[in-house]
Amino acid sequence: LPCWVRVSLVRASGLAGGYKTRRPFAALSAIATRAAHDAQGDEGPSVPLDEADCIRLERARLVEQYRQSVLKRRPRFLPFSECARWVAAMGLWDTEEEWQEWIANGEKRNPYIPSRPDEYYGKLGQWPGWASFLHGCDDGSCDDSSESSSSS
């Protein structure tokens, strides 16, 4: 079955000239626009595409749809207890300042650990303090008051 594309010359010409990023859907729209460029008015004619172009066009549409859905996603972080267990197992940080320096240096590679855990877990009402986060003390045995006085 042939695939047909109705091209709006005004809209598609904006796509052809406006995008400089690698967007296959816009590129195929621009190709279809060039094919329909001989038409008069804002609406171009229906342009027949061969099967390979139809497949490319559909694939480009799906890739763009997936990209948009990924951009709309909110980050998913571990629950506080598992996050604190991971941080304690790494054992790289003793203070909030060391954590912030590590983040500022671009070392955080784990997408499931928040860069600002105090803000994230604080909004959820689960933030007991930096000592609990950095050393994995769930039972309250960490003395967070000594750390907060050293950060002042």
Image (tube, helix red, strand yellow):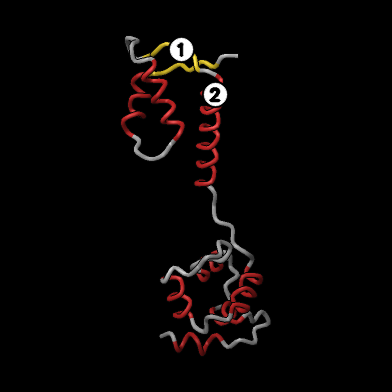
Where is mark 2, residue-wise?
52
Q: Residues within 10 Å of mark 2 (few under 14, many from 20)?
A: few
Report x, y in % for residue 36.
Answer: 38, 15
- What's the residue at 44%, 27% (across, down)? 28
Q: Is residue 12 left or right of residue 139?
A: left
Report x, y in % for residue 99.
Answer: 48, 76
The one of 21 and 94 positioned closer to us in this rendering: 21
Count of numbered labels shown in the rendering: 2
Report x, y in % for residue 92.
Answer: 54, 80
Q: Residues within 10 Å of mark 1 (few under 14, many from 20)?
A: some
Sequence-wise, the earlier of marks 1 and 2 is 1
> Looking at the picture, which amino acid does disc 1 mark?
Ser
Q: Quadrant of residue 150?
A: bottom left
The N terminus: image quadrant: top right
> Looking at the picture, which amino acid does disc 2 mark?
Ala
Report x, y in % for residue 78.
Answer: 62, 64
Give the numbered dot on residue 89.
none
Image vertical order of residue 28 relative to residue 92, above or below: above
Where is mark 1, residue-wise?
46
Image vertical order of residue 129 relative to residue 48, above or below: below
Q: CA distance from mark 1 to mark 2?
A: 17 Å
In the structure shown, which secondary structural element does the residue marked by tag 1 occupy?
Answer: strand
The C terminus: image quadrant: bottom left
In the structure shown, which secondary structural element does the residue marked by tag 2 occupy?
Answer: helix
Q: Quadrant of residue 79?
A: bottom right
The one of 8 and 134 positioned closer to us in this rendering: 8
